[in-house]
Amino acid sequence: MEIVSSNCASLSNYEVFEHLQKVKDCRPKHKGQLATITYETLRYLENTPCKEQTAQSIKECIRELAPFKLHKTELLMIINNPPITPLEIQFIVEESEERLTEDQVQEILAIIAKHFPHVIKTPPDEDEQSE
Amino acid sequence: MFILAEMKNVTRIPPELFHLKLNDAIAGELNKKLANKVVLNVGLCIALHDIVNLQESYIFPGDGASHTRVIFRYIVFRPFIEEILVGKIRSCSQEGVHVTLGFFDDILIPPTALQHPSRFNETEQAWVWEYDTGDGSKHDLFMDAGETIRFRVTAETFHDTCPAGPTLKENQDNPENRVSYSLQGSINEPGLGLLSWWDN
């Protein structure tokens, strides 16, 4: 086996979730390691905000965030773990104090809240139910 | 946290799979070969994404199977350095806090990367952040197993776990216990650590 490119693209959690869902539902059922890793990864992703996202909402959110000149990796983190407080923006965006004003941070949070309204509603202790 | 890796492989399709469509047979074989395995310097393989290119199949003398050169893309778990991830605490020990994502367990947050000041509580087997409340007193914040934790990925380590030759073997410390892919995290920034710490 040969590696052509060890990183030809980054995937958002949503894309992986969608793909694995398809893998899981296909017939005949997969067995062995593929079934194990698909099950475990889906279990993890089910507890992340990507479960409620749609391709449409992600696309629009990225389009509206474009003027803030965020890096690709920062956008990816915002999509995977949508921030709801200014504190979260601070550790996602490098040197955010210099690159973003307080108003811009509020604008970003408003855009995220508009496109991913489920993030705010989810109670923080949802993990306890799954165990 | 997930990436696509493009790889090339000569896939052998044994005759008993000839009733399948070639694409399906190859996808099955690639998943059998790679799913849930770590590829050195690539990451933990999850599932086949798509087949990019299929070349002609060959049959070799003495073998009924067909061999096909295939270029494909695989979904791989490999967070980039500095990425923020959310996981659960698996356990605490003197070496630090062990975190799991469910499908990936080899994440360690060393004591130096915990919130400052932190100490290890031997009786509870948990790390404790001695949070300074501001009025001179301290508030102990425990990091118990099972809690949800947010951390930053600071380093990754790949180890070749192939069986070593006899000469190399003596120098290595029990190679069977080595982990092929492990991550190091840190939580010594405001906002990182247990999610419950930052709720209000």
Image (cartoon, grey):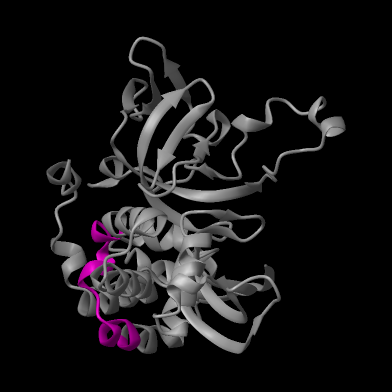
As drawn, which residue projects farthest toward the front? B62
Q: In the displayed structure, does residue A119 sit left or right of residue B172?
A: left
Q: Residue placed at 26% from the left, 64% from the top?
A: A49
Which quadrant holds residue A25? bottom left
Which range is magenta? A45-60
Q: Is residue A19 above or below residue B148?
A: below
Q: In the displayed structure, does residue B155 sit left or right of residue A76?
A: right
In reply to whether residue A16 is colored magenta, the answer given is no
Q: Nearer the viewer, residue B68 or A15?
A: B68
Which quadrant holds residue A104? bottom left
As drawn, which residue projects farthest toward the top? B123
Q: Residue placed at 38% from the left, 89% from the top?
A: A63
Which quadrant holds residue A62? bottom left
Give the x, y percent position of residue B29: 49, 68
Q: Nearer the viewer, residue B153 or B22?
A: B22
Q: Nearer the viewer, residue A33 or A80?
A: A33
Q: Residue placed at 50% from the left, 41% from the top?
A: B106
Q: Main secondary structure of the magenta part?
A: helix
- Does any portion of residue A114 appear in the rendered image? yes
Q: Is residue A27 above or below residue A55?
A: above
Q: Residue placed at 27% from the left, 63% from the top?
A: A84
